[in-house]
Amino acid sequence: MSKELTTVPNEPKISSDQAYDCIVLGFGGVGSQALRHAAQQGWKTLGIDQHGPAHDRGSSHGQSRNIRQSYTADPRYLPLLQRAYAMWDELNKRHRTSPDIKELLTQCGALQIGKPDSEIMQRILAAAEKYDVKIEQFSAEQVMQRLPIFKLTDEFVGVFEPTAGFLRVEICVAAAIKQAVKAGAELKSGLRVDRWESQDDGTILVTTDQESFTTKRLIVAAGAWSEKLLPGVDLKMQVLRKQQTWFQIDRVDQKLVNSFPCFAVEDASGDRFYGVPEIDSLGMKVCKRTGGQPLDSADHLNHDLDDAELEQVESFMGDFLNFGRSRLVHHTGCMYSQTADGDFVIDRHPENPNVTFAAGLSGHGFKFAPVLGKYLVDLLQGSDDAEFEFLKLR
Ligand SMILES: Cc1cc2nc3c(=O)[nH]c(=O)nc-3n(C[C@H](O)[C@H](O)[C@H](O)COP(=O)(O)OP(=O)(O)OC[C@H]3O[C@@H](n4cnc5c(N)ncnc54)[C@H](O)[C@@H]3O)c2cc1C
């Protein structure tokens, strides 16, 4: 009897070279880091992504991601953030093998502006005090003396954190993937995982639109697609489309080369906006942090210009920044995977301890990516860490 006739239709064909110690589903922000740590264990590791490395269809694109320690979310993120700084530094040393290679993390400082009695300012100051984060506090007038591009009324104050800054997001993802491949990881781009299931022999079958694989361990780092790929996990996650916009502004002091910092502002109505200095001539990035358009599916992300969001950003710029003319030069859509409380969820799968996942990064998770990626691997090795307890499935 020929081999073909004994094959059951639709039964996945798996040869031993498609059997892995660990598969990482999604090699975006978190998955790229998990891939690296998994491969560094000496595991036969495969990364699968429906798009290519460092693509613009998920949540890890748009030139920069801010990083700072005077944090507005739960202060329990702080110890993780301090580890993240060290891990980005370690990755940077491996990545930046010559001075003409751009650094992953630029510590240009960050200025946060708000009303002194606002919840956000109170949280920033409390976090800075508790974790001994170096900050400087300024009145509106002092901010404008130091950085004349700002136009503030007396009701606002500024908190400057000199060691804050930004990460070059796509370059960070590419750098982590490069280290993963160096450590032996295989990559499959352009394969969409349809499902995974636990098998009787303890392995996991991962089925894609093209081929299937088996693995002893699975890490799901699927970003805005997580709900579909985590059956049995109730994430209550909302996918929000967010717009990133860059502007050419007719003054030079907003450039990184002129020591302009990142900034974040909460206006009088509670809306929040942020900015990144002009890096690499693309223009100054100014975006709205709050709000966003709910998407039915992460597959529906588009890069069309949302005029309403642009108008809000331009109105913010008119109210808070001094400049003659500005011109929108670039824009892109991106996605927040928003949980109800804004906290990430990172844990073992409730039905299979050999599956770990990180999801719901809620618009503030990129800076933690190396820490989350490592923890996903540690959990698979049976090693837990109390500092992640508040991010476990609830
Ligand atoms: C506009 C914006 C601004 C932000 N600003 C900041 C900031 O300043 N600081 C900060 O720390 N964070 C920030 N964030 C949040 C941060 O960027 C994200 O939380 C983080 O990048 C998400 O990483 P991820 O790995 O979860 O998702 P992604 O990077 O999107 O990775 C998920 C991957 O899974 C793949 N995938 C999904 N489903 C499948 C499937 N079925 N088969 C194969 N592959 C699949 C996807 O293709 C994708 O590559 C921001 C986010 C946005 C959108």
Image: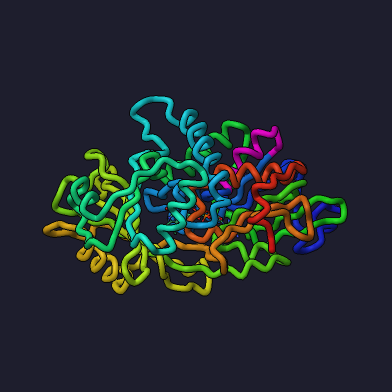
Which span is picked out in magenta? 31-44
Q: Quadrant of the N terminus?
A: bottom right
Q: Main secondary structure of the magenta part?
A: helix
Tell me the residue at 35%/53% (across/down). 112
Left or right relative to 264: residue 39: right
Tell me the residue at 77%/63% (across/down). 9
Left or right relative to 50: residue 125: left
Q: From the viewer's perspective, is residue 293 above or below residue 83?
A: below
Left or right relative to 262: residue 351: right
| Residue 24 within the segment the image draws in magenta | no
From where the camera sits, is residue 238 visible?
A: yes
Tell me the residue at 49%/38% (across/down). 85
- Nearest the camera: 288 or 59? 288
Q: Position of residue 56 (x, y in %)?
A: 43, 55
Q: Position of residue 124 (x, y in %)?
A: 44, 53
Q: Which residue occupies the extreme top position in the image? A: 98
Q: Position of residue 386 (x, y in %)?
A: 69, 47
- Nearest the camera: 270 or 28? 270
Q: Position of residue 266 (x, y in %)?
A: 35, 63
Left or right relative to 41: residue 251: left
Count of labels shown? 0
